[in-house]
Amino acid sequence: MKFSVLMSCYKNDNPEFLRIAIESSFIEQTLRPDEFLLIVDGPVSKELENIIAEFENRYKYIFKVHKLKENKGLGNALRVGVLNCSNEYIIRMDSDDVSRKDRFEKLISYAKRHPECSVIGSYTAEFEIDVNYLTSVRVVKEHHNDIVQQSKSRSPVSHVSVLFKKKAVLGAGNYMDFPLYEDYYLWIRMLKEQYVFHNIPEILVFVRTDKNRYKRKGNKTYIKSTLAFQRYLREVGFINGREYFINKNGRLLVAMIPPWIRKFVYVNLLRRKPTKI
């Protein structure tokens, strides 16, 4: 089964993190992709250009680069990426995360056995400096009906973990611009179109985070986008009035508390403590 890997990078990405992300989701995989498509979202630094050129030259028949003249944001970059991927199955990867070595093998194996699934994700684990020292684990529901229920209160799939069918994503309108919610917005539209979801209950991706992550979840941009997304869910009838009230006010409360308390809520209440993988 042929598949593509889709990644986007932009000017603020760390060059070394980009190298690690590409190597972990390409060179080091037990099952390598047939195509690796990197969308460069606007002009980037010379350091990033050099790393991109290095992979492009070494793996010119597999590693493909599509450069956008201007930075248009993740939603637009991934929209272009989906349209330019050559294969029906596409695996997402972020430019600063780390894939487990058998991630693609696990995803493709499940996709082969369950062709009815259009989106397949997994658990993810967070780390700050060293991937061997995890801080928390994001657990998501495994089966479709439970995923539908979870999607009413939180994103039911970790974006960085997914494999999806190109036709299904296009059938739901592809990625669209919705700052900070590009993926969740896509999942809701796909669920409304009755596409089948599944999450593998294993940690297949290690997500790089930093000390400012929880501070950002209280800024005006985050609050504005969060409230707009909850209004969208209510307007399209995906959640009812009671669910809208709980979601909106719960998120406002978390946004208003001090960052250190917000971090405690995420790490201890919305995540699990890491265990041996």
Image (cartoon, rainbow, N blue to C red):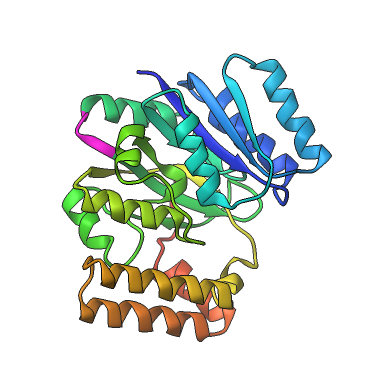
- Asked whether, in this view, residue 30 is left or right of residue 215, the answer is left
Q: Quadrant of residue 182?
A: bottom left
Q: Is residue 190 visible?
A: yes
What residue do we see at 42% from left, 72% from top?
Answer: 228
What residue do we see at 45% from left, 75% from top?
Answer: 265
- Asked whether, in this view, residue 147 is left or right of residue 86, the answer is left
Front in this rendered view, residue 197 or 122: 197
Front in this rendered view, residue 231 or 251: 231
Q: Which residues are magenta?
A: 114-118
Residue 142, position as x, y percentages in the image: 25, 48
Q: Quadrant of residue 269?
A: bottom left
116 in the magenta segment: yes
What residue do we see at 39% from left, 67% from top?
Answer: 270
- Asked whether, in this view, residue 65 is left or right of residue 110, the answer is right
- Location of the C terminus by quadrant is top left
Indicate whether 230 appears above or below 23: below
Residue 149, position as x, y percentages in the image: 21, 61
- Location of the N terminus by quadrant is top left
Q: Is residue 28 visible?
A: no
- Asked whether, in this view, residue 78 is left or right of residue 21, the answer is left
Residue 258, position as x, y percentages in the image: 57, 84
Indicate whether 117 appears above or below 151: above
Farthest top residue?
Answer: 61
Dominant SS in magenta? loop
90 in the magenta segment: no
